[in-house]
Amino acid sequence: MIRIAAFDDFPQFLELLRRELEENDIRDVTFHSDEQDFLEAVVDATDIAIIDNSIKGTHVTGIDLMREVFRKAPYCRVIIISAFLDVPVIERAYNNGAWKVMDKTRDTFFDDLVYFINQHKPILEVEHRLRR
C-alpha cells in the first residue's frame, strides 16, 4: 500500500480531497492544513506528497515545502497543486523536483489526480517494498 501525505491550508478542500480519494479506494492518506504538522507527518516511507503551492499568511510556498519533504523523504514523489498557476510557477515546481503540477480549479481535477495516482500505483508499491 502506498502512503500519501496531503497539505492544503484550506480545510474544506482537504475534506473534498479526502472524500474523493476514499471513494476511489486510496486510503492510506494523512491530511494537514498546517505546514509544520504536514512536515512532521512526512517520513521516509511517504510515497506521495500532495502540496498546495499557495499558503495564505506566509512567505512560504508549496515549492518551499517540497524541498523540505525531499530532505526528509528523498524518494517521495511530490504533486504540486494550485488554483493560481502560471508558467513561472510551473517551471519552478518542475525545476525543483515536482513529479506533477496540477490546476485544482479544473473541473476534472479530482478525476485527473485519482487517475494519475492509480496509473503509478503498481510502480510505487514495488518501490515502497524495495525501500524497506
Image (cartoon, rainbow, N blue to C red):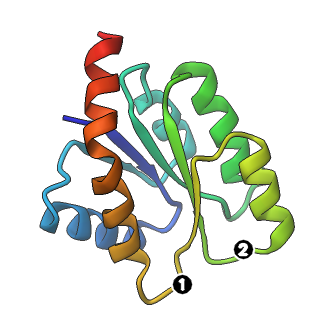
Quarter of the rendering containing residue 126: top left
The picture places residue 50, in percent across and down from the top left corner, at 47, 52
Residues packed near mark 1 inside 10 Å, few (<14), some (14 to 19) or many (20 plus): few
Quarter of the rendering containing residue 83: bottom right
Residue 88 in sight: yes
Q: Which residue is drawn at 61% across and 27% down?
A: 70
In the rendered structure, which amino acid carries the disc numbered 2?
Answer: Leu
Q: Quarter holding the N terminus? A: top left
Quarter of the rendering containing residue 100: bottom right
Looking at the picture, tell me which residue is in the foreground, 123 or 40: 123
Residue 59 in sight: no
Q: How far apart are the two marked residues, 2 and 1, measured between alpha carbons? A: 10 Å
Mark 2, secondary structure of its residue? loop
The picture places residue 85, in percent across and down from the top left corner, at 72, 74
Q: Which residue is drawn at 57% across and 47% down?
A: 99
Looking at the picture, tell me which residue is in the foreground, 129 or 106: 129
Identify the residue position indicated by label 2 in the image. Answer: 85
Determine whether 40 is above or below 58 in the image: above
